[in-house]
Amino acid sequence: MSSREKEQSIALSAVFQAAELVAILAKTGKVDNTALQPMIDSVLLINASSTEDIYGGQWDYQSNLSLGRNVAKKALGKERSSVNPDTLRYALSLVHLENKLAKTPQMLSTIGQKISQIEQKKAHYDSVLHENIIASISGMYQDTLSTLPFRIQVQGDSRFLQQPYIANQVRAILMSGIRAAMLWRQLGGKRWHLIFKRKALLSALESRS
């Protein structure tokens, strides 16, 4: 396994973690904060020294992304049928939407400015999961990615999705998925790799090194 494949597996795990969290939240109205926090942290971490550092560093990234890694292994392996169809759709949609974003430099610049503003605001709260931080990231998603022609349609229980805080969480998680999809692309990942490089990606996902 090359170091590039290892890094791609980290980015792919994060894409699937975001997708799975959105699917769970939309259906149940709640998610595990231990899986949510590293995803929200990643949105506000711009200048990480390594791919591992984006998701907690070499000692914690595996546990922080364990949900997404497990889902990704199933999706690329023989247990694909056991993966929530919504999760698969969201994961592929995140990769597609990020490709659209990459072609709009002005929007990328706007997102960068907004992240800097939210990063400054973060100092006033004890957690990135504070509702005001979540709302700010959600607003950033609404002001930018939600204006593109392609939009991710989230399906779930309307009783939950109509609640402002849950709707904000969904958009904030989608933003973290875009962050992961951007990383995947920057590391050379392409959508067709999910079909034709499945064996190499699976090997990297299953590695503990």
Image (cartoon, rainbow, N blue to C red):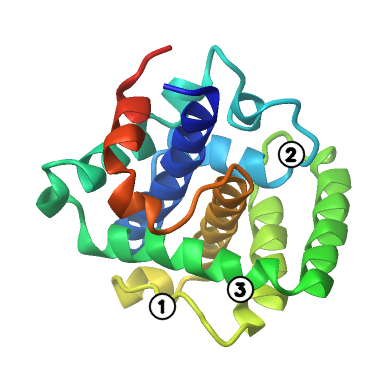
Q: Which residue is mark 2?
A: 45
| Residue 30 shows in the view | no
Nearest-to-viewer mark from 3 and 1: 3
Amino acid type for the residue under numbered disc 2: Leu
Q: Which residue is mark 3?
A: 100
Q: Which residue is mark 1?
A: 153
Quarter of the N terminus within the rendering: top left
Residue at (47, 31) in percent of width and height? 5
- The front one of 74 and 152 is 74
- Residue 142 falls in which quadrant of the image? bottom right
Residue 191: where, in percent of width, then height? 42, 59
Q: Is residue 191 above or below residue 197?
A: below
Q: How far apart are the alpha carbons under marks 3 and 1?
A: 16 Å
Whichever of callouts 3 and 2 sits on the residue coming sooner in the sequence is 2
Amino acid type for the residue under numbered disc 1: Gln
Residue 28: where, in percent of width, then height? 29, 57
Whichever of callouts 3 and 1 sits on the residue coming sooner in the sequence is 3
Packing grade of label 2 (10 A; few <14, some 14-19, many >=20) is some
Nearest-to-viewer mark from 3 and 2: 3
- Residue 141 falls in which quadrant of the image? bottom right
Residue 135: where, in percent of width, then height? 66, 61
| Residue 59 shows in the view | yes
Residue 14: where, in percent of width, then height? 47, 42
Dot 1: what SS?
Answer: loop
Packing grade of label 1 (10 A; few <14, some 14-19, many >=20) is few
Q: Is residue 77 above or below residue 102?
A: above
Residue at (32, 66) in percent of width and height? 89
Looking at this rendering, what residue extends furthest in the bottom direction? 149
